[in-house]
Image (cartoon, rainbow, N blue to C red):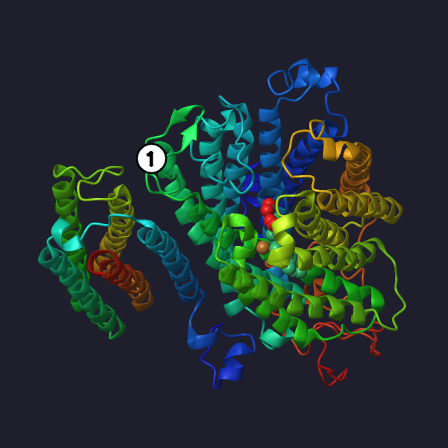
Amino acid sequence: MTNGFVRRYIFSTDHKIIGIQYILTGLIMAIVGAWLAVLIRLQLGWPEHQWVFLSRLLPKGMPSGVMTPEFYLAVVTMHGTIMVFFFISYVLVSGFGNYLVPLQVGARDMAFPFLNMLSYWIALLSAVVMVLSFFVEGGAAAAGWTAYPPLSAVASAVPGSQMGQTLWILSMALFIASFTMSGLNIVATVFSTRAPGLSMMRLPLTVWSFFIASILGLLAFPPLTAGAVMLLFDRHFGTSFFLPSGLVVAGKLLPNTGGSPLLWQHLFWFLGHPEVYVLILPALGIAFDILPAFTRKPVFGYRISVWCLVAVGCLSMIVWGHHMFVSGMSPFTGEYFSLVTLTITVPMTIFGVNMLASLWGAKLELRTPMLFALSVIAMFGSGGFGGLFLGNATADMQLHDTYFVVGHFHMMIGGVTLLATFAAIYFWFPKMFGRTMNETLGRLHFWFTFGPFFVIFFMQHFLGLQGAPRRYYAFTAFDYLRDTRGQNLAISIAALLLVSGQLLFLVNFVWSLFGGLAAKANPWQATTLEWTTASPPPHGNFETQPVVERWAYEYGVQTTDGDFAVQTVPARNVPVTA
Amino acid sequence: MTQPAATTIDRWSGGTCPFDAGWRKVMMWWFIITDGLLFAGFLGAYGYARILALRWPDQSTVFSLPYIAAMTFVLITSSATMASAVEAAKEGKRRLALRFIVLTAIGGAVFLGMQAYEWWHLIEEGARLNTNPWGDASFSAYFFLLTGFHGSHVLTGVSILITTAIRTAKGWSTADGVEMAGLYWHFVDLVWVFIFTLFYLL
Ligand code: HEM
Ligand SMILES: [Cu+2]
C-alpha cells in the first residue's frame, strides 16, 4: 500500500470516493440492521421457540435460545435507529448526494471538499459508536428509535437505559454534526457551483430533491440537538427537563420536579417528521429521473414537481404534532395538525401522479433500475394511503402505536427508500465502477425484494386494525390477539425470504465489481451531465467545463447519438424543448 | 469563475453565484441559520417549561438588571466595533481593521468575564442545575443551559476574532475573511438580545 493509495481511496477529498465510502458503510450497516430484523421476526413468528444456535451466539440476550424482553426492546430500538440514520441516510442521502450532486451540476467537486471528508469520517465514527453500544454494560439503548423519556432519561428504567443510551445520544450527536457538514456542502454546491447555463429550473429533479432534503435537514436537526443536550443533562447532571414530579421507577420515587416528557416529543418530532422527508425526497427524485431513461420520453410536469418538492419541504416543518395526537393535546391543536397533515398529501399526490403520467403512452423498457423505479411509485401510493388514515386525529386515536403505523412507515421510510436505493445502485453502478451489474440476477433480486416487502407491510396494516400494539415482545398473552399467530408466522416467513433475497444483490454487487462487463460512458443513453464524462469519471469530473444548453429530459428527439440529447448539446444542433 | 452578473435571472442561471456571494458566504449563512435554530430549540423548550411552571421567580429579585444591562451594552458595542472592522478591511485599511478587531475581542472577553462573575454569584447563593432557591428548579436549569450555551458561542467567537486579528496583523487575512468573522459575531450578539429579552426581561 503506497501513500498514494491512502490519499486516493482512504483519506480522499474527492466527492466520488467519499460518496462510495458512504454507500459501502451504509450497506454494511444495512446488514447489521437486517440481522436485527431477523431476530425480531424469529421472536414474533415463533415466540417461545428455543433457538439453540442463537443462544450460543447471544448468551446474554437469548439465554436458552429465547430472547429476553429487555433484549427485544434493544433490538427493536437499534434496528430502527440503524436503518433510518445509518443505512438510508448514509447510502441514499449522503452517499448518492455526494456522488451525484457535483456531477449533475457540472462541478469539479463539492464546494468544500475537506469538510466533506471530515463529514464522512465523523459519520463512520458515529456508526462505530452505535454498534459498540451493544457491548457495554446493560446492552444497547432500548427506548425506541424515538428515545422517549422517561425510558431514555432514567438509567434504572431498563438495562439499555444505562451506558447504552448515553452512547446512543453521543452517536446521534456525531451523526448530526456530520449530516450538518454534508448538508451545508450540498446546499452551497447547488447554490454556487452550477455550470454555466444550468439554471435552477434546468436542474435534474435528483439535484432538486437533494437540495430540498439538505435544507430540511439543516433546519430540523438543530432543535433535536438541543433536545439531546437536555436529555444528557437529565441523565447525568440531575436536571428535570423531561422528568415530571412524582415519577416512580422500579418502586422508587425519583427526586425530579417540574419537567415534561412531552417536551421531548415536540423536540423529537420537530426533527423526526422533516427527517422522514429528508429520506423520501431523494428517493422520489431519483425514481423520477430514472423513469425517462426507460420510457424514452420527457417526464410529465417537471416544473410542478419541483414546486411540489418545495411545498412538501415547507409543509413538513409544521406537521410534527400528528405523531402526538394521543398525547392529550387540545382538540383544536389536533384539528390543526390533522388539517396541515392532510394538506401535505396534496403536493405528494401531485408528485406521484406526475410520475405515473410520465409513463403514459410510453413503451417501457423493464430493465432492473426501471423495475425498482416503478415499484417506488407503487410503494409510495400504498404507504401514502395508510398515511391518510393516520393523519385524521379521530382515526389515529385507534391506530396510534399499532402495527398499522408500523406498516405505514415501513412502506414509506423503508420501502420507498429501499427500492429507490436499489434503483440508484443498479442505475449508477456503471458510472461509479465502470462495470455493469448482471441483469438476470438484478431482476430476480427485484422480485425477491418488492414481493416479500409489500406482503409483509401490507399485512401489518391489518394486524394494526385488529389492535396489535407495536413494540410488544409477544402476543401470546392476549386473548384477542391469539388469532394473529398465523399472520405473524406468514410475515416472518416473508421476512426471511426478503432477507435471503438480498444475497442475490450482494453476490451481484461483488461479482460485478470485479467481473462485470465494461460500461460505456453513457450506457442508458440518459441526458444528465454525469453521462457526458467517462465511466468512472476522472478526478475533477470533466475534461472541460460543461456548458448547459437545455433541460434534463430531452428525449424523443432526433440526434446523431439516438433519440435523446444530453444537456450540453447546443441549441443550434437540436431544438430546445424546455 | 465568479463574475458579477447583470440581472437576477442571470445570477441564478448557472456559472456564477447568486447574490454575488461565494460558496463560503453561502455556507456561513446556512451555518448561522442552523445554529440559530439550535437556540430556537433551547428557547422554545424554555418557553414550554415556563408555561408549565408553578412558581417562576421574579427575575428582578434574582438578577441585578442594571448589571445585565451593562453586559448587554458591552456586547452590542462590540458589534459596532466589528462593523467598523469589516468596513475598514473592505477599504484596505489593515491597521485600522486590526485595531477594531482587537477592540471587539476585548468586548467579548469583558462580556465573558462579567458572565462568569454572575454565574459565580448565583452559585454562591445556592443555584444549581437542579436547585433554585427562588422557586421552580427549572429556572436555574434553563438559566445555566441558555447562558452556558451562549457563553460557549461567545468564547468560540473570541477565538475566531483572535485568529483573525493575528492573520490581519501578518497581512494574511482577506476582507472576506474579516466579514465572515463579523457575520458570526453579529449572530452571537443577536442571540444574546433574544436571551436577554426572553429570559431576563419578560
Ligand atoms: C401521505 C402523506 C403522509 C401522511 C398523511 C402521514 C401521516 C402519518 C401520521 C399521522 C403518523 C403518526 C401515526 C401514529 O403514530 O399514530 C405517521 C407516522 C409515520 N410516518 Fe407518515 N405520513 C405520510 C407520509 C410519510 C412519509 C413520506 C414517510 C417517510 C418517508 C413517513 C414516515 C412515517 C414514520 C417513520 C412514522 C412513524 C414514526 C414512529 O412512530 O416510529 N410518512 N405518518
Ligand atoms: Cu410525520
- Picture quadrant where residue A521 is located: bottom right
**Residue A346, visible in the rendered structure:** yes
- Picture quadrant where residue A401 is located: top right
Q: Position of residue A576 (x, y in %)?
A: 73, 83
- Depicted B165 relative to depicted A448: above or below: below
Q: Nearer the viewer, residue A294 or A428?
A: A294
Q: Label 1: how many residues lie within 10 Å, few (<14), some (14-19) or many (20+)?
A: some
Q: Position of residue A437 (x, y in %)?
A: 81, 48
Q: Position of residue A98 (x, y in %)?
A: 59, 54
Q: Is residue B74 left or right of residue A193?
A: left
Q: How many marks?
A: 1
Name the residue beneath numbered marker 1.
Answer: A256
Residue that appears at 79% across and 67% down? A356
- Depicted B188 relative to depicted A87: above or below: below
Q: Nearer the viewer, residue A299 or A203?
A: A299
Q: Nearer the viewer, residue A539 or A66?
A: A66
For the residue marked with disc 1, what is the amino acid? Asn
Element at label 1: loop
**Residue A99, visible in the rendered structure:** no
